[in-house]
Every structure is written in structure tokens, then in C-alpha cells.
Image: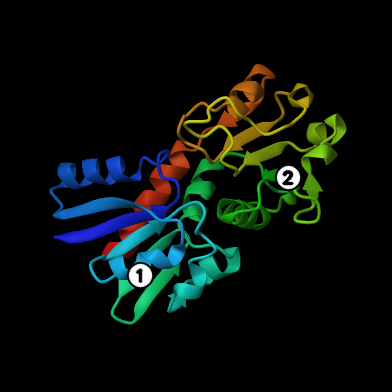
Amino acid sequence: MKHFALIGFPLGHSLSAAYFAEKFEREGIAADYTPLAIQRVEEVLPHCESLAGFNVTIPHKQAIIPLLAAISDEAEAVGAVNCVKVTTEGLVGYNTDVVGIRKSLEGVELQGAKALVLGTGGASKAVQYVLHEGGAEVQVVSRTRGVADLTYDDLSEELVRESRIIVNTTPLGMFPNTDSAPALPYKALTSAHTLFDCVYNPRLTKFLKLGAEQGARTIDGLRMFYSQAEASWQIWTE
């Protein structure tokens, strides 16, 4: 039997273990998938002797990189890793978030669009990569001044009105804190806007609900989750 895992902290929001357990049972695969709630990324190393691969989530997508023996070109370009294959030569890092983000944004016109990316972590880096790849003009928003292009205090109604794509890559709205949402002037949103939330639990976050109330198109994080999970499986088994 092969063993796989998810590392991050906390992990209460994640559906990965349930997804892979159902997949293994449905397809008759002799494998298991274990959530490992670790606060320091180095804590994964003792587990690697028994693992064939593992996923990486908040807050370790960037911190894992120094532990890798090799990294894919795309993951290196993104600057974040969410999938690791354990090999005889060491740990090899990949980014399958970009696969899920591309699929989630299919049908959204990116070329020349002004986009706001909320958050500065690993998921943010993957979103920025895909948006730039598609020709969007991207500005990144952080709570802390000097960390990104903008802070939430800079998000005027005019700026939000002009930014037709807004992506939440923060944990705001994630279970169990489902009543939280990024601080935006939501009344500036229109039917010309697309809101994409990388959070998938719950599927309808407060961020998306507030956008939908203004007529905006909304995209939840579930397609991204499924797509990146399947892409991870392909990497582990190829």
C-alpha cells in the first residue's frame, strides 16, 4: 500500500482526505491519505520515509521550498509548491494550483483586464502567475503596507469598479470562520465583475455572496480543488 498525506496548519477546512479516500475506494487503489497538522514545515521530514507524495497547504507552500531536492520550472516561476513527490533522490516540488486556477478561469476574458488579488501567500502567487499569463493587469492587496501593491485602505469604490476580476486567496470566509470576508466596497461591484474565491469550504463564501448580491459573476474554489488534486495524483503516479 502506498501512503500519501497533506501537510499544513490548521487542517480543519480541508476536504483532501475525504476526496482521496473516496477516490481510492471507488477506483480500487491500495493507498491511504493522511492529514498531518504540522506547525513547522521541517516536521514533515520524518514522515517522508513512508510517503510516496504529499500535498502542501497554508502556511507551508513557500516554506517547503528549501527542503526540496528539485522543483519544477512552473513551481519555481510561481514561487510556491503545493505538491511534493518523494523520490530516491529527495523531494521534488510542483505547483498544481495553477492547473486548478486555469480551469476555474476558463471563459473569463483575462487579456487587458484589471485584476485585484487579495492576499500574498502561496495561492496568491499561483493566481498572479495565471493572470499574468493571460494578459491581465494585476495588483496585489495586503493588510500590511509595503508588502504588496495596495492595502485594503486603498480600495476605493472607483478602483474596485475598474477592477473587473477580483480573486480572494486569503483564508477569510473559510470554515469555521464563515462570517468573515475581505474588506471591500462591495456596492461598487456590477454584473461586469467576476469574483473568484480560492476557498472551497464553504462553497458559497460571504465574499461570493456579497458579490452575487451586486450581480457579479462568482466562481467558487471547488473546481480548483478537484483539478489540483487530480493533477497531484498524476504526478505521484507517473
Residue 218 left/right relative to 23: right
Q: Residues within 10 Å of mark 2 (few under 14, many from 20)?
A: some
User: Picture quarter containing residue 77?
Assistant: bottom right
Q: Quadrant of the N terminus?
A: bottom left
Give the secondary structure at mark 1.
helix
Residue 229 left/right relative to 142: left
Q: Nearer the viewer, residue 151 or 236?
A: 151
Q: Nearer the viewer, residue 223 or 106?
A: 223
Residue 134, given in percent of the width and then of the height, sits at 65, 53
Q: Quadrant of the C terminus?
A: bottom left
Residue 205, given in percent of the width and then of the height, sits at 54, 28
Q: Which residue is mark 1?
A: 45
The tag on residue 18 is: none
Residue 60, given in percent of the width and then of the height, sits at 50, 59
Residue 153 left/right relative to 87: right
Relative vertical location of residue 102 with respect to residue 209 in this rendering, above or below: below
The tag on residue 143 is: 2
The amino acid sitting under disc 2 is Arg
Give the secondary structure at mark 2.
loop
Relative vertical location of residue 99 with respect to residue 166 in this rendering, above or below: below
Residue 85, given in percent of the width and then of the height, sits at 34, 68
